[in-house]
């Protein structure tokens, strides 16, 4: 399996809330800090988007699609100086998958999906992305809008199997966003995605993911990239933001965290599966990377 597909699979994305809202009048809607990401597609009208700690507001017009992946509070507004109305109030009467109206509608019609993730692997997907990612590619915008509309249709009809269909549509929407980022934005900011877009480095990442227990060295990884040891180490850090073996450690700990969620698993078994002969050495690395002991990730 290619590296992007594997990380998305391990991240276990799910649709938390999906819907559309036709907003009328002058209003500023405040959203709290959040887990996961928001996808927004503007169908008609326009509004302003202000993400916390981002100096410049973003004006969204019909046809625009954006991804919010920082988890920061944000505001959607006709005028950012207006008093805030909490999102929970605005969307209280809108059931999941439905179309809602606020203040009679007519000012801005927007489709939205809130995706959450059941695994820390999602950090590999979104670390390094800007707080507001504009989807510029026309086909990607159409695909996102279509995915959200299909999710809404499935949730409204609730036919047999609709939960699985929505799950697959979430994966499709996410892949479209990340493909866009790989094609248009990777390389501007050091990140896992930027490394995946690099033709020399992507086979290295796939090998790390496929064989985390292997005793990788900078030299053996450089060989996969068809680069000298020095050239590889320099390029890997510049593109991914981490030295090769530091990246490997983070990847191993993410894989280990996923394994620890399985029933009746032993810490010693997980340690060996990701290349650690010593359980204590594994636990030390795990705590350093993820900020908690391996047992905190285990099911009771």
Image (spheres, rainbow, N blue to C red):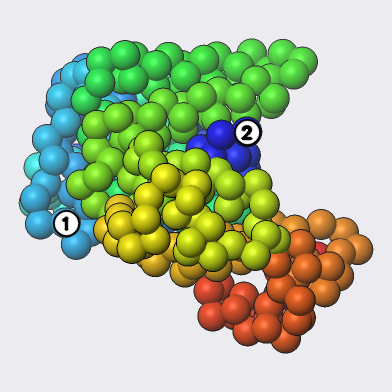
Position of residue 265 in the picture relative to residue 43 (left or right): right
- Within 10 angstroms of label 2, few (less than 14), some, or many (20 or more) residues? few
Instruction: Name which residue lies at 54% across and 80% down.
Output: 288
Please say if 8 is above or below 165: below
Between 153 and 258, the residue placed more toward the observer is 258
Q: Decide if residue 118 is in sight here.
A: no
Alpha-carbon distance for marks 1 and 2?
Answer: 36 Å
Instruction: Name which residue lies at 54% across and 40% down.
Output: 3
Mark 1 or 2, nearer chain start: 2
What quarter of the picture does the N terminus occupy?
top right
Position of residue 142 in the picture relative to residue 94 (left or right): left
Instruction: State the image coordinates of residue 19 (x, y, percent, origin top left).
Output: 45, 27
Instruction: State the image coordinates of residue 44 (x, y, percent, origin top left).
Output: 21, 17
Q: Which residue in the structure is indicated by mark 2? A: 1
Q: Which residue in the structure is indicated by mark 1? A: 54
Instruction: State the image coordinates of residue 271 (x, y, percent, origin top left).
Output: 75, 70
- In what element is the residue under mark 2? loop
**Toward which corner of the image does residue 59 lie, by quadrant?**
top left
- In what element is the residue under mark 1? loop
**Toward which corner of the image does residue 165 lie, by quadrant?**
top right
Between 258 and 100, the residue placed more toward the observer is 258
**Toward which corner of the image does residue 60 lie, by quadrant?**
top left
Instruction: Name which residue lies at 74% across and 18% down.
Output: 161
């Amino acid at each position: 399996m290619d590296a992007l597909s594997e990380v998305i699979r391990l991240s276990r994305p799910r649709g938390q809330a999906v819907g559309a809202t036709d907003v009328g009048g002058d209003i500023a809607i405040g959203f709290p800090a959040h887990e996961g990401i928001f996808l927004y597609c503007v169908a008609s009208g326009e509004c302003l988007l202000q993400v916390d700690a981002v100096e410049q507001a973003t004006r969204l017009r019909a046809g625009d699609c954006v991804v919010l992946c920082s988890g920061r509070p944000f505001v959607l507004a006709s005028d950012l100086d207006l008093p805030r109305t909490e999102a929970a109030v605005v969307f209280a009467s809108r059931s999941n998958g439905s179309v809602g109206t606020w203040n009679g509608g007519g000012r801005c019609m927007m489709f939205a999906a809130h995706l959450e993730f059941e695994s820390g692997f999602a950090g590999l997907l979104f670390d390094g992305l800007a707080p507001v990612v504009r989807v510029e590619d026309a086909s990607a915008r159409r695909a996102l809008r279509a995915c959200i509309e299909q999710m809404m249709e499935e949730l409204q009809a609730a036919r047999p199997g609709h939960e699985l269909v929505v799950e697959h549509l979430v994966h499709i929407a996410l892949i479209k966003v990340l493909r866009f980022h790989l094609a248009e934005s990777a390389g501007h900011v050091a990140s896992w995605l930027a490394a995946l877009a690099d033709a020399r480095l992507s086979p290295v990442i796939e090998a790390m993911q496929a064989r985390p227990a292997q005793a990788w060295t900078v030299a053996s990884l450089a060989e996969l990239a068809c680069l000298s040891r020095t050239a590889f180490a320099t390029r890997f850090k510049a593109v991914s933001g981490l030295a090769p073996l530091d990246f490997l450690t983070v990847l191993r700990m993410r894989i280990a965290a996923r394994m620890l969620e399985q029933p009746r698993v032993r810490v010693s078994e997980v340690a060996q599966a990701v290349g650690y002969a010593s359980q204590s050495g594994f636990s030390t690395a795990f705590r350093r990377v993820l900020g908690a002991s391996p047992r905190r990730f285990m099911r009771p």
